[in-house]
Amino acid sequence: MDTQVIIVGAGPVGLTLAIDLGRRGIRCILLEQKDAPQFLPKMERCNARTMEIYRRFGIAKKIREAGYPRDVPMDVFIITSLIEPPLLRLPYPSVAEAQAEIESHNDGTLPLEPYQLISQYTLEPLLKSVAEGLPSVDVRYAHEFVSFAQDAGGVTAKVKTKDGSVVEISGDYLVGCDGGSSNVRRQIGIKLQGEANLLQLRQALYYCEDLFDRIPIGKGRHYHVADNHATFLIVQDSTRHFTLHAVVDSDEDMKRMFEKTVAMPVKYEMLSCAPWRQNLLVADNYGQDRVFLAGDAVHLVIPTGGLGMNSGVGDAVDLAWKLAATLQGWGGPNLLASYETERRQIGIRNVEASRQASRGRRAWRSAWKPEINDKTPEGEAARANLVRIADVEQRKSNEMIGAELGYRYRGSPIICEEPGEGPPDEFMHYVPSTWPGARLPHAWLDDGRAMQDLIGDGYTLLRLGRSQANSEALAKAFATHRAPFAVLDIADERPREIYGHDLLLLRPDMHVVWRGNSLPDPVRLAAVATGH
């Protein structure tokens, strides 16, 4: 075999997968048909869960240093232009303010890391440099995936190199992280289901040196224009680059729309412009045999809510530890089989969250009337009505903490199910829970350390509240499978209050396998957790 895992596509999802595999010592080759990361606008925000994941990789600080200034607000505006008083301003804290709030709370309701605005064209080169620094990761740009063949022993990919020659690369597994038009998915024959081509817009990227400093109505990240073109201005991480989305007929129209939105004389350059379509789609399957799919290859959402790339990062970290476990010999057959079970339900869930957010935005946009800019009683009434609706509905796009943190894996073969319904699943509100399948809520220890920072990359039995439960039999059961296992004793009272049980068994991705106050059959518990 040339490698253990072949990854197709070096966007944020493929790069995240390569980094997670690489830090676990798994050999992988990452293939990307482009010569280098491109300076094109796509995603522009890592959500709280993604930043928690990148913290575990040791790169959260580096991402923040490269991203949107930490002291600038993340406010969202609905406007008629950048120089008129805003119709609505929804305040959201800067990263610095969010971090201060997290440091002052210890009830499990907040993430360990807040969001970070960072443009994809900034994030990709950063992740690329991290991946290239890992000894077991081989990053190959200007290598176009052509096709694959698989059998019981492995996968062989045909790849076109920069000089036009076609070479073969063999591996144990292949993962397609190659986007919405995934070549890997098409070759398997997996279909996408849902709503396609809901709306076609154009997106343009602009460079404007002094615009952000000159905005008179207040600093923020999103400026929605109340018009009949779905116009939407986004501040990128440098605060010198901006993207504009609008329903218009031509690229030239995008220049006029930018000027109309800015409404003051500025020197700018339009760097790129391209059409895009809104889709709400999920793949029927997340792979076949030794070939898996992740990211936009299996779920396409409308960017409202910011669940696209962030969902893909969740796919990557779920798949990475399961591939590593299988290749290292301690993962049972249910481990890789659980990838589709766990992540497809989250794909469906996040598509629905995106749908709700999009409906919210459409609700207030549908209240637009031609007289909305008029200084008349009719114009005033039109503005008041739109604001009344937007103050409720626009929040569905910007307040998605429940969607980000509150997901849990249901019906998974590697989770110990509990009877009952479990906690409510809400997109806009997060209720901390250790129900099996859920992410471990953030908790501070008495000495100021974060619980998540103490969880290793294997399985962890968290022993809380001065529990004296004997873990020797469980350790022996994990050792039978040669699976990494550690016990973490935390005597502090507050984590025990937040987590609600004396004992929690955590997986390598910090999701809860089992919880209780006394250990069940250790042999069965270890067998379920490791996929045996």
Image (spheres, grey):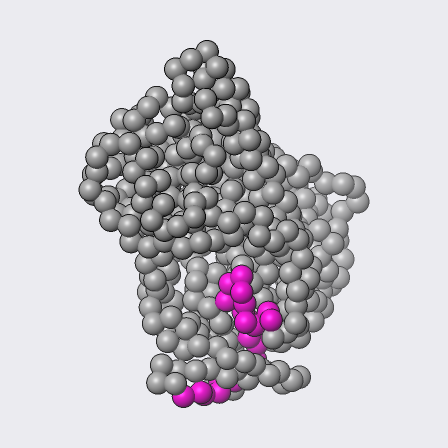
| Magenta-colored stretch includes residue 173 | yes
The tally of labels here is 0
Say whether residue 194 is left or right of residue 212: right
Q: Nearer the viewer, residue 406 or 493?
A: 406
Q: Nearer the viewer, residue 436 or 448?
A: 436
Q: Nearer the viewer, residue 483 or 132?
A: 132
Residue 401 appears anywhere in the view: no
Residue 205 appears anywhere in the view: yes
Q: Residue at x 43, y 82 (%)?
A: 160
| Residue 79 point in image, percent of width and height | 39, 28
Q: Which residues are magenta?
A: 165-186
Question: Outermost residue, right direction?
Answer: 419
Q: Is residue 398 above or below residue 31?
A: above
Q: Is residue 426 above or below residue 462?
A: above
Say whether residue 234 is left or right of residue 509: left
Q: Residue at x 69, y 71 (%)?
A: 333
Indicate the quadrant containing the C terminus: top left, top right, bottom left or bottom right.
bottom right
Q: Residue at x 79, y 41 (%)?
A: 420
Q: On the image, which quarter does residue 295 sit in?
A: bottom right
| Residue 28 point in image, percent of width and height | 47, 75
Q: On the image, which quarter does residue 101 sit in?
A: top left
| Residue 146 point in image, percent of width and height | 50, 79
| Magenta-colored stretch includes residue 127 | no
Question: Outermost residue, top direction?
Answer: 377
Q: Residue at x 53, y 35 (%)?
A: 361
Q: On the image, which quarter does residue 483 sit in?
A: bottom right
